Image: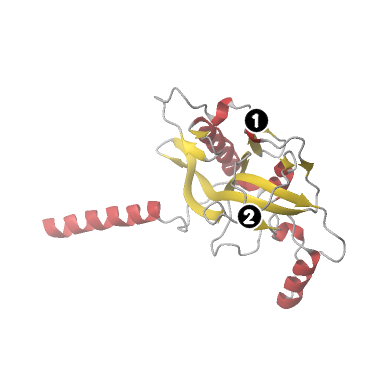
Amino acid sequence: MKKTILFLVLASISVISCRKDDPTAAEPEVSIETQNAYDDEATIEFLKTHYLDAKGNVKDFVETDTVNTKLFDLNPVTLPSGVVYVKKVASQPDPGTVIGDKDILRLMNIATTYVAQSTDGKVKFGSSYPFRNTVSTGNPEVDPAYYYVKNSVLAAFNSKYGTSYDHSYYEIEGFREAIQKFKAYDIPDEENYNLQGVIIVPSRAAFARDPHFNYSNISFRNRSFIFNFQVYKTTTRIIPDQD
């Protein structure tokens, strides 16, 4: 009997551990209002527990650190949508190029998606899953559809699957909004990176609970996104040739 009880306890611990380690495991869904509140609270927690290193990479901040500055203290800007962006002041192009609504971006980027969750009374981002990492490859991503999806791509998808999705099926609205608050460099792809800042997109400004394009073989329902990036170049899209 004791062996049976011990086995059940160990099995329960194993299941709980696996759920915590598996970012694709479904979490109990809360109301939209609660999820929005969790997203905002987790954003603040993230800003208070991370900093930017000399290359602009997001790193964990420890309270004994007397050298680096928390993202929270780098004048984060909150947009009406709930999106928050932080600029690394010393890493902005001068004068830089304004980013247009339909531009073709060349983006060096580390992006991760999370679910804001309450665990043991503490709200923070969990269930992390990599979305993009071009820093590891050294090659900027060119013309990402989550910024602007070409009409030809959207039309081809709808034709193939008999759907009628619009641009929001591909695009991350909050990322589009915030990236235009930055300016682009005009540097070659092979140049070493110097990340410009951070954009935190709450789930309501990403895909919320709507259908979306399958970027990563997981659902982005209720998922927030954190982008740590540098815009290497932006060019005006030629319509209709490049659309």
Image position, residue 77 (x, y; %): 67, 31
Front residue (pair 144, 95): 95
Image position, residue 147 (x, y; %): 71, 53
The answer to whether residue 72 is left or right of residue 233 is left
Front residue (pair 205, 11): 205
Res 100 seen here: yes
Label 2, on which residue? 140
Please state the total of marks drawn on the protein image. Answer: 2
Dot placed on the residue nearer the N-terminal end, 2 or 1: 1
| Residue at image point 80% right, 65% down | 151
Q: What element carries label 2?
A: loop
Residue, far left: 2
Q: In this view, does 162 lie above or below 218?
A: below
Res 223 seen here: no
Can you say which quadrant of the picture contains the N terminus?
Answer: bottom left
| Residue at image point 61% right, 45% down | 229
Front residue (pair 166, 184): 184
Image position, residue 26 (x, y; %): 48, 57
Q: In this view, does 64 lie above or below 228?
A: above
Identify which amino acid the numbered label 1 is placed on. Answer: Val
Front residue (pair 69, 49): 69
Q: In this view, does 77 lie above or below 162?
A: above
Residue, far right: 239
Q: How far apart are the two marked residues, 2 and 1, measured between alpha carbons?
A: 21 Å
| Residue at image point 26% right, 58% down | 11
Image position, residue 91 (x, y; %): 64, 35
Label 1, on which residue? 89
